[in-house]
Amino acid sequence: MGGVVILRVEKLKYLGSIIEERGDIDTDINHHIRVGWKKCKKASGVLCDKKIPFRLKERVYRMVVQLALLYRAECWLIKKIQFQRLMVVEMRMIGWMFGYTKLDRIRNVVIRERVGVAPLEEKLRETRLR
């Protein structure tokens, strides 16, 4: 174009999302998972303190970590495997915050009821419908 060479790239970050040449969103999901963990660790003073009530932790989690995980998710054409990765990451974060481990052998549904966090699937559906 007018003597200017335009480079072809495989990935491009645009408005907070990573767009790949193939149209896949794996890199974007990985980015959101990393950001979610960063937010979780920054708020660990509140999220991991045993003196703070579950309801407050749950609110902080929803307002900080869950929003980082689902930022711009209403535009994603997500596959089942990618969604499963998000669900695993979310349960690890919740377990880390509230002190649950795999050795406790508690089902995810029971942990969600105790903690009061809605499943990521519901939140994703809610953001798409909004």
Image (cartoon, rainbow, N blue to C red):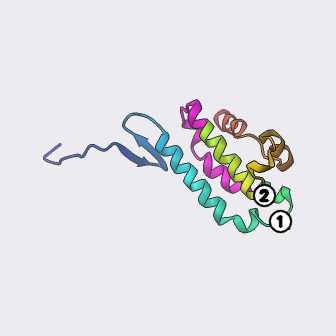
Q: Where does the magenta region start and end? A: 61-83
Q: Nearer the viewer, residue 128 or 59?
A: 59
Residue at horizontal 36%, vertical 37%? 21
Q: Name the image quarter holding the N terminus.
A: top left
Where does label 2 land, which residue?
99
Along the horizontal axis of the image, is 95 left or right of 70?
Answer: right
The secondary structure that most of the magenta stretch takes on is helix
**In the depicted view, which residue is nearer to us: 94 or 123?**
94
Q: CA distance from mark 1 to mark 2?
A: 9 Å
Q: Identify the mark nearer the N-term, 1 or 2.
A: 1
Residue appearing at x 58%, y 40% in the figure: 73
- Residue 91 in the image: x percent, y percent? 71, 46
Q: Confirm whether residue 62 shows in the render.
A: no
Where is residue 67? Give x, y as percent: 65, 50
| Spot occupied by residue 33 in the image (x, y as percentages of width and height) | 57, 50
Q: Who is closer to the viewer here, 3 or 94?
A: 94
Quarter of the image with the C terminus in it:
top right
SS state under label 2: loop
Placement of 59 over or under 112, stated as above or below: below
Give the residue number, with chain letter if any, for mark 1. Answer: 50
Q: Are marks 1 and 2 in contact (CB under 8 Å)?
A: yes
Residue 79 is one of the magenta-drawn residues? yes
Asked if residue 86 lies in the magenta stretch, the reply is no
Question: Label 1's element?
Answer: loop
Name the amino acid, label 1. Lys
Q: How packed is label 2: few (under 14 Cα within 10 Å), some, or many (20 or more)?
A: few
Asked whether, in this view, residue 63 is left or right of residue 27, the answer is right
